[in-house]
Image: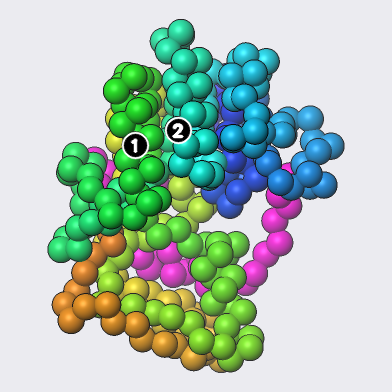
Amino acid sequence: MQREGRKQRILILGASGFIGNSLYRELYPYFDVHGTYCTQIGAFSENRVFHHFCDGKDNLSVLLDRLRPTIVISAMKGQSKNQIEAHRQLVDYTFLNPKRRVFYISSSEVFDAYKHRPFYENDTVLSESASGKLKISLEKLLQENLFSQTTIVRLPLVLGINSHEIFHLRQCIRHRATFEVFPNLVVTATTSNKICQQIHYCINQSLRGIVHLASNDLIHHDELFREITSKIGVEIPIFKNVFSSNEDRYKAILSKNKMPEPYQITVSEVIEESSLSEEIVSIK
């Protein structure tokens, strides 16, 4: 990657979270990267590029005016009305300068009212869950006001060594506890490492619009976790099969606009990376 981007200042909203902190570690050698945290006072309070911000309590406009980022990546979570207000302030800040850009981290939840097939970038969104409806609202807010300045990044099931799902799987293996799998659920997946590489590429290439960052292929949910467990090579947990329908249903996104081959990923690569030896990564 080029190091010319250091002139650009990137602010990651939610840099203390799993995806946000992975992005911080990917981007900080190349850009002037700052991030926000809310509750992890001890972990981040002495880090000068991490800034305390809690939506619903703090005014995002103040932080934006102080840091003046050219790119804002929104990976934060929170209550619906607080999220919407924070992103309205982000719109106001970004709108004033056409060179500023926003990356919004969304997910396959925007399609969760559908069950019959995987979905692509230009398919109509429809959700029945609160989180999916919020993501649709934020996507719409950004696209209607900052169409040429916004990149919507939709994610599938995100795994990797330090992901919540893999951590939970390993805990279930250690303690011979129950791990739920869904035999009739078809998914796409990816890893946090691949997402970060892909978003880095999107920044360098100034990609706009909607991008789906998912594996090129699909797999049943139970098969995915059984294969990861077999790769780990230890005892298996107690797999509990959960059937929510008699037919296959989908929680999967695919891309019609594939990235160059080095930035693509397959399910087998997700399985391989998720079954590597555990590592401890500093959150700073």
Residue 270 in view in this figure: yes
Q: Which residues are magenta?
A: 255-284
Give the vertical position of 269 relative to 146 (above or below): below
Q: Nearer the viewer, residue 51 or 200?
A: 51
Tell me if label 1 and label 2 are in contact, CB under 8 Å: yes
Residue at the (51%, 87%) spot, across then down: 178
According to the picture, the residue beneath numbered tag 1 turns out to be 137
Q: Main secondary structure of the magenta part?
A: loop
Asked if residue 207 is among those painted magenta in the image, a careful observer would answer no
Q: Nearer the viewer, residue 118 or 65?
A: 65
Identify the amino acid type marked 1.
Answer: Ser
The image quadrant where one finds the C terminus is: top right
Disc sitting over residue 68 in the figure? none
Residue at the (33%, 46%) spot, across then down: 133
Give the vertical position of 43 relative to 27 (above or below): below
Give the vertical position of 125 relative to 160 (above or below): above
Residue at the (23%, 56%) spot, across then down: 113
Residue 199 in view in this figure: no
Identify the amino acid type marked 2.
Answer: Ile
Q: How far apart are the alpha carbons under marks 1 and 2? A: 8 Å
**How far from the left and from the top, in percent, is residue 30?**
61, 30
Q: Nearer the viewer, residue 35 or 162?
A: 35
Give the vertical position of 23 relative to 241 (above or below): above
Q: In this rendering, would 243 be left or right of 153?
A: left
